[in-house]
Image (cartoon, rainbow, N blue to C red):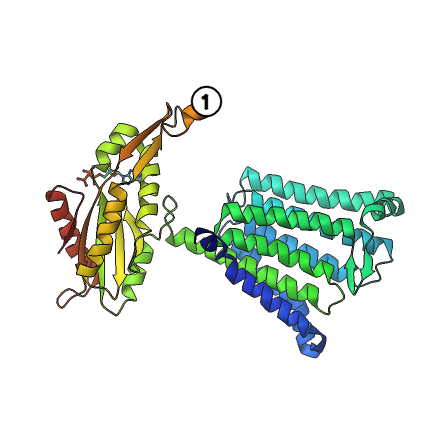
């Protein structure tokens, strides 16, 4: 189940790649204005991608676009001629090795904006790599190509242009990119992996008409959608818990016409918890509690309302049914021992001591109180329902906490 969720983010980008593959199956029929449009579309998409990357300060989007465009330009400028020409072989070899490597580095380096030192290092590496490739060719020319040929000589093979060692290396890079996606998780990591795939695939099927244009379009659409999703998350998601925030809650409520119930959930005695263990440990606990709340059943949607308060909505469900699911969440939290680590001691001691029960760890018990209400006659506006749920939450606190009250 968990593994399936891990792969689900691949679906949108995978679907775009599938469409690109299908388009290639019919690409021999493309002609006239369509041919022109397909050749120019990558430039238009790249312009939009660059604009978005600059607007939202997204280095991963910027480099995905720039590298895809550079790869596309190189294919269009150099790889439309016979592979027997040394310069063509040189560019081909660089493309199958350096392009996925640069995209992989872009994927590995955490997103910290366009002008973070991280980003500067990456830009320098890409520009330096490019300059070294150009200067080496200008100075060494034939000799360089001959030595590369010894390892990566591309051969025509059943219609594919292929270099066995190149294929092995690019498959390894692709595997590294997939492993990176696997550990980074999420739709953005999936998009970055699919951008690597979309850049690499056409290089092995260069005799298919328009393949480089079609896959450049696919890579850029994936990069754009990933960038838009990233910016959307920035606006709507709470960075600490990964849940949608208050803005998304109110948008969701405004668009909800049918019956629903709404709950306000508050962590008990969180102030004294913060005072005892510090704000950082408080943050860890907030994230852990959020991950438990997110396991709510019954189609419940979870939002971080602010501070240590969360909101749950149950579309199409009355408060009494919602109460059952809320009680399950309350109980799950109350019976889960939260292991907290003292960050000042985290780096000290042996690995065993750092583990569960070690010197730097402590187990705490967290409870939550919940108030729930529902859309009703005389109580139809989201603000009114939130207010009613808040009142019920207040009652739950008064009743001794760690309980669910309907109001
Ligand atoms: N660590 C951390 N603490 C937060 C965050 N947001 C709010 N808090 C803290 O949450 C605490 C909320 O305290 P109160 O609402 O007074 O709750 P309480 O009195 O401790 O407990 P109850 O009476 O059971 O609600 C305050 O100490 C806030 O500083 C956050 O993002 N991280």
Describe residue 307's horizontal placement relative to residue 150 as left or right: left
Camera sees residue 65: no
Describe residue 92's horizontal placement relative to residue 246 as left or right: right
Q: Position of residue 208 (x, y in %)?
A: 73, 68
Mark 1 crowd level (few <14, some 14–19, many ≥20, 10 Å Cα): few
Q: Position of residue 334 (x, y in %)?
A: 24, 41
Q: Nearer the viewer, residue 210 or 135?
A: 210
Question: Where is residue 369, by image quadrant?
Answer: top left
Q: Residue furthest top?
A: 349
Question: Where is residue 50, by image quadrant?
Answer: bottom right
Above/below status of 247 relative to 286: below
Q: Residue at x 53, y 54 (%)?
A: 190
Q: Residue at x 70, y 41 (%)?
A: 128
Q: Position of residue 46 (x, y in %)?
A: 60, 60
Q: Nearer the viewer, residue 166 or 129?
A: 166
Ligand 1: image quarter: top left
Describe residue 39's horizontal placement relative to residue 262 as left or right: right
Q: Residue at x 39, y 46 (%)?
A: 239
Q: Which residue is mark 1?
A: 350
Q: Position of residue 207 (x, y in %)?
A: 76, 66
């Amino acid at each position: 189940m968990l593994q399936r969720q891990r792969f689900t983010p691949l679906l949108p980008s995978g679907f775009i790649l599938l469409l690109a593959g299908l388009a290639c199956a019919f690409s021999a029929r493309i002609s006239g204005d369509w041919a022109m449009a397909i050749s120019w579309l990558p430039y238009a998409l790249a312009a939009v991608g660059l604009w978005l990357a600059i607007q939202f300060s997204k280095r991963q989007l910027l480099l995905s676009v720039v590298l895809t465009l550079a790869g596309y330009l190189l294919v269009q400028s150099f790889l439309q001629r016979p592979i027997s020409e040394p310069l063509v072989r040189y560019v081909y070899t660089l493309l199958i090795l350096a392009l996925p490597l640069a995209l992989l580095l872009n994927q590995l380096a955490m997103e910290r904006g366009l002008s973070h030192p991280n980003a500067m290092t990456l830009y320098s590496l890409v520009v330096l790599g490019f300059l070294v490739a150009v200067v080496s060719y200008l100075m060494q020319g034939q000799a360089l190509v001959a030595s590369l040929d010894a390892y990566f000589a591309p051969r025509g093979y059943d219609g594919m242009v292929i270099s066995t060692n190149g294929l092995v290396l690019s498959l390894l890079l692709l595997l590294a990119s997939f492993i990176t996606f696997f550990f980074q998780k999420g739709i953005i990591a999936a998009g970055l992996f699919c951008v690597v795939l979309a850049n690499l695939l056409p290089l092995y099927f260069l005799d298919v008409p328009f393949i480089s244009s079609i896959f450049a379009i696919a890579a850029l659409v994936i990069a754009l959608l990933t960038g838009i999703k990233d910016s959307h998350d920035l606006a709507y998601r709470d960075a600490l818990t990964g849940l949608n925030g208050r803005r998304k809650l109110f948008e969701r409520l405004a668009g909800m016409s049918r019956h629903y119930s709404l709950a306000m959930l508050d962590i008990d005695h969180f102030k004294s918890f913060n005072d005892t263990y510090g704000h950082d440990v408080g943050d860890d606990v907030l994230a852990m509690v959020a991950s438990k709340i997110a396991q709510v059943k019954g189609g419940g949607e979870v939002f971080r309302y602010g501070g240590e308060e969360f909101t749950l909505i149950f579309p199409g469900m009355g408060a009494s049914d919602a109460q059952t699911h809320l009680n399950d969440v309350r109980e799950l939290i109350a019976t889960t021992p939260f292991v907290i680590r003292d960050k000042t001691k985290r780096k000290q001691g042996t690995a065993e001591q750092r583990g569960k029960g070690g010197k730097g760890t402590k187990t705490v018990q967290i409870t939550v109180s919940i108030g729930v209400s529902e859309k009703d006659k005389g109580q139809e506006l989201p603000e009114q329902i939130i207010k009613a749920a808040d009142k019920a939450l207040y009652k739950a606190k008064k009743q001794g906490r760690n309980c669910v009250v309907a109001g």
